[in-house]
Image (cartoon, rainbow, N blue to C red):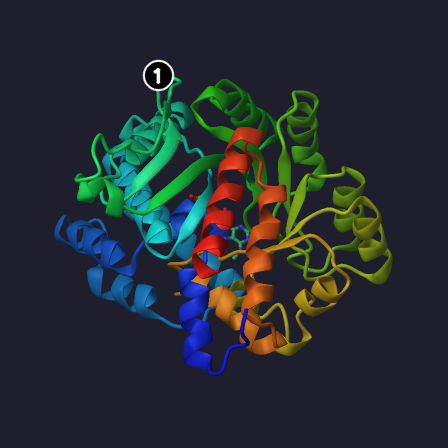
Amino acid sequence: MEKCTNLAEMKEWCRAIPKIELHAHLNGCIRDSTLLELAKLLGEKGVIIFADVEHVIRKCGRSLTECFQLFDLFHILATDHETISRITKEVVEDFAAEEVVYLELRTTPKNNEAKGMTKRSYMKAVINGLRSVDTVDASFINLNGKTESFCEPMQKSCTTCMEKKKIYVRLLLSIDRRETTAAAMETVCLALEMREFGVVGIDLSGNPVVGEWNTFLPALKYAKEQGLPVTLHCGEVSNKMEIQAMLNFSPDRIGHACFLDEDDWEKARLSQIPVEICLTSNLRTQRLSSIHVHHFANLYNANHPLVLCTDDTGLFSTSLSNEYYLAAETFGLDKKDMLQLGANAIEFVFADSEVKKAIREIFRAFERRLA
Ligand code: 6MZ
């Protein structure tokens, strides 16, 4: 494979190669255009003042605290079941459009009495959103427990089916750090119940300066005992005690990992915990002074398992292709490195071995086309 001669060529390569997204929050990935449309509607109903919200949505560059204030706004804009289904559909279509072939989408199931919403009905709305995807070919597990496979064209002449991008979608249920032990347990029980509908794991997320590790531990332990993989937002802020406790828990993956000390990295290295790297998110929320000091470089050079992810494509105006390009450009990786980096992530997905096998084949087919 030849070296990239210019940045434009690398940008196009990062867009064209198959990619795996393992750290994307549904409500953080809403399109700006959809947010503005929803805000306008609520403005007309007098629920919010559109001009104020428009300014917040369009703002570039936010602190971590401002991000969490914005999530509260997103949750006001996207509260009903139809909107949840709509944003799910759009997010899947957006990822597929940029050659993401496997998406592990995470979301926090929410109770909202005023909207007649329970955590279970919220998740049904998400799955209905997956079902309504039509501009791309999505493989997920529907509410009847059946895998909705890619549509197989009956005849070669069915060009619409043949041209559609294909994407595997699986779900992670997030526990928000504002939640109680009982609420966290409710989410884990729901995830276990919804395993047959494509829920493949649990995530712990939310404002990292809120809540205590011990509050979530019983629910996370239960998930683990039941064989449900767990990924943790770990070390997004400096909190030595919590980072140590999280690593002692032996999660299946960790996200961010910006504030791990040498001894923490030693532990992560010994247990080979895959790290979900979110470059733009870490930069925008000022977790680092510069991208050049990002821990990606050390982990990559040490061959530590890692996967490039977006975190919140909408909130940070990024895409997975952009994250790949940023890594390539900043750390001097070539085309072959980037393809390999993407393929390595197959081993860290929470889906079953059949899905892994299928994604491996997608990468092989891409390489064959290059040869
Ligand atoms: C921690 C984050 C996050 O679940 O409503 N979330 N948690 N750190 C981050 N880095 C910036 N980005 C997003 O999607 C939005 C929720 O995901 C979590 C927060 O809890 C946020 O409210 P869902 O679909």
Q: Residue at x 35, y 43 (%)?
A: 166
Residue 173 visible from this viewpoint: no
Q: Position of residue 246 (x, y in %)?
A: 74, 43
- Residue with the mark numbered 1: 144
Taking 311 as reference, is 275 left or right?
right
* Number of other residues with Cα within 10 Å of mark 1, as a class: few under 14, some 14 to 19, many 20 or more: few
Q: Residue at x 39, y 48 (%)?
A: 27
Q: Amino acid at mark 1?
A: Asn
Give whichever of 45, 95 is nearer the camera: 95
Task: Name the image quarter holding the N terminus.
Answer: bottom right
Q: Is residue 217 above or below residue 288?
A: above
Q: Position of residue 100 (x, y in %)?
A: 42, 51
Taking 321 as reference, is 349 left or right?
right
Q: Is residue 132 above or below residue 232?
A: above
**SS at circle 1:** loop
Q: Residue at x 29, y 30 (%)?
A: 128
Q: Residue at x 51, y 65 (%)?
A: 324
Q: Position of residue 305 (x, y in %)?
A: 69, 52
